[in-house]
Amino acid sequence: MDIKPLLGLSGVLIAAMTSEFNDQVTSIALIDVRGALGISHDSGTWIESLYVSAEIIGMAISPWLLMTFTLRRWTLFAIALCGASSVLIPFSPNIEAIYALRLLQGLAGGLIIPLVMATAFRILTPKIRLYGLAVYALTATFTPALASTVAALWTDVVDWRFAFLQTIPLCSLAGVLVWYCVDQDQPKYERFRMLDWRGALLLVIGIGALSTMLYQGDRLDWFNSRLICVLALVSAIAIPLLLVNEWFHPLPILKLQMLGQRNLAYGVLGLFLFVIISQSGSTVPLRFLQQVQGYRPLQSNLITLEIAALQLVMLPAMALLLDYRRVDSRVVSLVGLGLILASCIGSSFVTVYWNRDQFYIWQLFQAIGQPMVVMPLLMKATNTVISPADGPLASALLNTARATAEATSAWFLELIDRWRDALHSDRIVDEAGQDRWRVIQGNGVLPQYPPPLMPDGRLRAPGSLEAFGHAVQQQVTILSTSDTFLILGALTVFLMLAVMTLPVRTMPPRIHFAKQ
């Protein structure tokens, strides 16, 4: 086999990993970035919000534009946009410039990621297509898990600016590989005569409003905010209009009719839920270690590095396993989801004494389970693509669901935090108040744990009441973290039910497409 196309695929993969780092590394290092640039917390939330909104839009429109401008030209443009927007952020003169560059950075990331699947479909024959899916799966499992290690390197060892400057060597290498190794096709500019401009406009307005509402809703107290009310109204009007428009348009951005195929419908739903569930192996434990134990990224990154390292073994192993005729991909998915469920249940026993060592065994379950879910999911979804022209359209549906899940997961975790934090805080404070003379004020029961106040109401020691409040908040965080793991476990059970009911069995690509 000619190695040149494989080098081209490697270039697209490097570009996709770079765009993932732009998202995940910046998110983890955001506190350091805000501090260095003098950005407040509220203003800093828009740095993430704008990126995700633009990323969703980019993932939806990239496959359509890819078929118009050709793979080589469109990939080079996206890589150039990714590199230029990232490099300029550390030198931005004001917050408005950062917002604009972050929008472009998110758009570039959204444009790049679907190109991995499109390139794999183009250069890999059905005989080795599973390994192309493993390459795409790296962007869903390996790169997000590696991001905390990269963030730790830049913020705690080198310099925060490299969270953005890292794109210089990566985008340069990706651009050279794509320019040299990807063949140039004939562009199809005549497609612009049938441009779905109405769908594109509704997509920008509707999805942009929805993702912004999900990201900013908790901070702005939801429908007590006029902005959130307006965003909710806009998305409630624009998204149904978008769906109707895409259904009837002759050359749509999102070909919704393809969801009539059960395996592709499962792929879209499963990938959406998987992105949310996978937070149990990354965001949730990292946040616990930061809030309860005071860990920096350099101290906590090993628990996600464990997941990242094992992906390099597990993803090729899953490609090899799924290539056997006798292996039912649905069973593989159920085993993987069972491991993730076990990880969620085990991690729910978290206590104040837990540090990163207690997470290692449960992260191992995540590391094995995640590729066992993602690889069968991608195989089922992509086996529905018979015509090469349908490949980018299927990619648009899958990647739009994936990007939307990122905004949804942020909303979902904030919802759990607010709901369970309020419950546990009220209960702990109520219990402490009912037992005031033993817990808050008095001589106490155990001499090593005296109440913060003396019997006459005076402070037992300077800062003792603040320390008591910190201990209460610490317990609230622990209980809420436990609840989060259990709720994500329940979502895993729901996905297991979907696996058992929605998809039908499909053969490995080398067998499936030989029958066509």
Image (cartoon, rainbow, N blue to C red):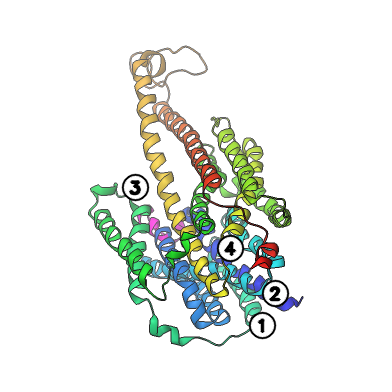
Magenta span: 33-47
Q: Which residue in the protein does label 1 denote? A: 180
Q: Quadrant of the C terminus?
A: bottom right
Residue occupying image coordinates x 32% and y 74%: 198
Is residue 192 shown left or right of residue 304? left
Q: Which residue in the protein does label 3 denote? A: 218
Amino acid type at image mark 1: Tyr
| Relative image position of residue 340 (x, y in whole percent) | 59, 42
Q: Which residue in the protein does label 2 denote? A: 7
Report if the CB atoms under discs 2 and 1 are less than 8 Å apart: yes
Q: Earlier in the sequence, mark 4 or mark 1?
A: 1
Residue, far front = 515
Q: CA distance from mark 2 to mark 1?
A: 9 Å
Q: Looking at the picture, does residue 76 appear above or below residue 163?
A: below
Q: Which residue in the protein does label 4 denote? A: 382
* Front residue (pair 474, 330): 330
